[in-house]
Image (tube, grey):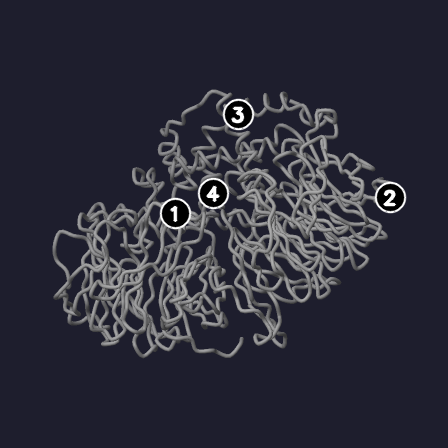
Amino acid sequence: MNSDIDIPVEDLRLQLHLALDRIVVDDQPWPVVHADLRRRLREHRRRVLSAVAVVGAAAAVASVIVAVQPAARHSTSPVVPGTVPLRIVASAQFRGTTPPRIATGAGVVFAALWDSGTVVRLDPVTLQQTGSVRVGSAQNGPLSVAYGAGSLWVLNFHDGRLWRIDPSAMRPTMKIKLGAEPSQLAFGDNAVWVTVCCDTTHTANRQRLLRINPTSGAITGSIAMPGDGETVNVAVGPQVLLVSSQNAPVSVVDPQTLTVQRRLHAPCDFCDGAPGIAVGEGSFYVTSATSVLRYSDSTGKIIAESPPFAVGSTATPVVLAPDGLWLTSSDQLVRLAVTDLRVTDRVPLSAATEVALAEPSMYVSAPGRLVRLSREAPSTTATPTPTADGAGITAPTWAKELAGEVAIKCGNSFCLMRPDGTGERPLDATFPEWDPAWSPDGRRIAFRGYYGTGDGEYAIYLVNSDGCHVTRLPGTDGFATPTWSADGSRLAFAAGGGISVINASGRALHPVTTGIGNQLDSAPSWSATNRIAFVRAQRGDPRGEIYTMDPDGSHLAAITADSASYAQPAWSPDGSTLAMVVSANGNERIGAPLTIDVANADGSHRHPVTPRTWSSFDPTWTPDGRLVFLASKPAGTDAYLVNPNGSGLKRVYNGPAGQDGIEQITWGPPRLDAAHC
Amino acid sequence: LKVVEGEQHGDRARRDEHVAALYYRHRPELVRLAIGLVGDVGEAEEVVQDAFAGLLRRWSALRELEAAPAYLRTAVVNGARARWRRRALRERMIGFFRGPSETSEPDIAERSTVLTAIGRLPLRKRACVLLRYYADLSEAETAAVLGVSVGTVKSQTAKALAQLAGWLEAQQSGAKQ
């Protein structure tokens, strides 16, 4: 970049106005606009209420909500040296994408499922369902659950009442009218605590906290709470109650007299939710926009603040556990020391929302699923549920016969797993991650990872397959689709219209094809016979052709040459066969008809192996020479397996329910256990 | 207007009147700002609509009505930032044939050299340029909208201008050849 060149700012100003002011922005009548804004408010309310946790201080369970503003995301170290890392040992999958609300008690786990309108009881080890109760309809039912006084408590948005449920029979034993729209629920100090808002009789103080006798169901107290009623959190501690609301100070409430003893001002203007709160260790913990603050419970003064903390943009819950303060963010669990609030542990976990603790397990909800984490040794843990893994996909039992290891998109990261879905661990090295490529020995993965939040702010990264030792290859900003040489010593990738090669050590980056002029090269695949296949297109022409070349760019050979468009070449493990995506009419969009063809290395004997009406893409080979690919259909994108002669076509993975399906998949060699970080 | 202090929290009709007035006065400029940020009319309108919904939601936190436009600009920039994940997915879905860097040029940007160049800047630099030279905000106002220091605005803007100048000059010299 030549920084000596100046641009006349007045000229820029003029050009910007010329370009933007000519765009016609249509107005709509206010009633239409207002209805749309109200719809967005309702959607926001539903999303926040169904995503955040409320505190129950019973037994070892305590939780908190953390609300934070967007911040930069940093890569994580998955384990703390010298400790046994927390890892996923069981998981359950649910309909829809709303994270389940969770509560623990009576030796079991309860999950409130907004998307199906039910509350289910789960085995605490396997997370298999052992009972359920319907409390409403799909996306109009349980807002929140808590356990206390031998009962399960469910805040029901459907009828606006608090339900008391017998946890053994999973049947309601009482439905308590609340008189206003409910928002949050907690159990503690032998009472049920519910916040309500928007009661027309309380226009000046819209939001109220209700104390409910768990035996009689009577409302025994009520107090007005500041805040606009959008989101609210309640944390119950010994003889003290914290209530936080969006855009309002945190109230410290005496649970007996229902009087406000103190207000804590947290710097959280325009936070996207109520500040997170927790009580314990002689302290109140409150989240600000970018950190966690610790207040003395006797003076109300701030006595510690965590380092600036990069967490997600939505409300993020926290558990005050015996070993520290656990926060979830969109892609990791973080533990803070309760005294000085330094970070003491990080566990990669995609899209985590709520956390509940019941020693020795930690239960974490995420969109459409619930997982159990534990530090138990593998030999003593339950077998992970094979049909409901963290990637949200469903694997058939015969998948265990398949060789190799799979990298499959889960959320914004990749999940690595055996073909039958077991042994899964998330690869949370950057955020998000795309284009994984297994090294030939299966110990490392190269991928395209984002280092910033802007378009194109990504580079090529290397990481061990256990998630350790993330390194960014220098000079690879904006590069994509890495592929390994057969000996694992070098990588090639698409680099600004050309193909470049670099040593795996990060040295000797050099272009092989340059992308000069109208030529655009992309999607390289490096064969076991040391040939690189890639796509070559001309600027302005949507069609691509497949070429092969030696790694130094010599011996260029055209593999395809006709009116169709070709993409995503993928060499078979022995380098004798090349798979590729074909668009007969040149419409290269996923969703349009795309077949996967297989040909000899010189392009001869090319034939389709997938149905012509399907939209098939992302071909990848198993170690024993079978093809796996993705097929996009109206119901979602699933993964299929087929032999290179077109026989044996069958589905291998269903995409996660309620989502668009699997977004990317790459098969690799069998797993080799690497040493921990 | 002396707002919001003194108004009853429950006075929704009054709040809605204020928001309606703000909507018709500021929406066109905000949509165009958002187009500059996200490069797509549909996405820009969504970002702006979400910003107004957020204003309704957080009305009681506004100290004075004059603060509303600044809040809306901040919400638009934040909304644009929140869209980057979706953009990453779109790059993948549309662009797998050509690699991500060669695809998904925004629809508006295709018709404007300067917007194409702006669209190549990282979001913060893009926001600095648009807020300074399209929304005509001062450095201090831009810093407040972005939640960064004035020094950051200065340096980001200077770097952005240098990059823009380089790209635009290269494009012009290419066009002459």
What distance separates the C-alpha of mark 3 from that of mark 4?
A: 22 Å
Asked whether the residues under marks 2 and 3 belong to the same chain, the reply is yes
- The label shown at residue A256 is 2
Residue kind at label 2, given as amino acid type: Gln
Q: Amino acid at mark 3?
A: His
Alpha carbon distance from label 3 to label 1: 45 Å
Among numbered discs 3 and 1, the one appearing first in the sequence: 1
Residue named by callout 3: A34
Nearer mark to the viewer, of 4 and 1:
4
Q: Are marks 4 and 1 in contact (CB under 8 Å)?
A: no
Numbered label attached to residue B80: 4
Q: Which residue is drawn at the image coordinates 24% and 59% (left, top)?
A: A521
Of discs 4 and 2, which sits in the foreground? 2
Of A180 and B116, nearer the camera is A180
**Secondary structure found at label 1:** loop
Rendered position, A630 above or below B46: below
Pointer 1 with pointer 2, Cβ within 8 A: no
Q: Chain of mark 4?
A: B
Q: Can residue A520 be seen here?
A: no
Q: Identify the subunit bearing mark 3.
A: A
- Cβ atoms under marks 2 and 3 closer than 8 Å: no
For disc 1, the chain is A
| Disc nearest the viewer among 3 and 4 | 3
> How many other residues sit within 10 Å of disc 2, few (<14), some (14-19) or many (≥20)?
few
Name the residue that disc number 1 marks.
A6
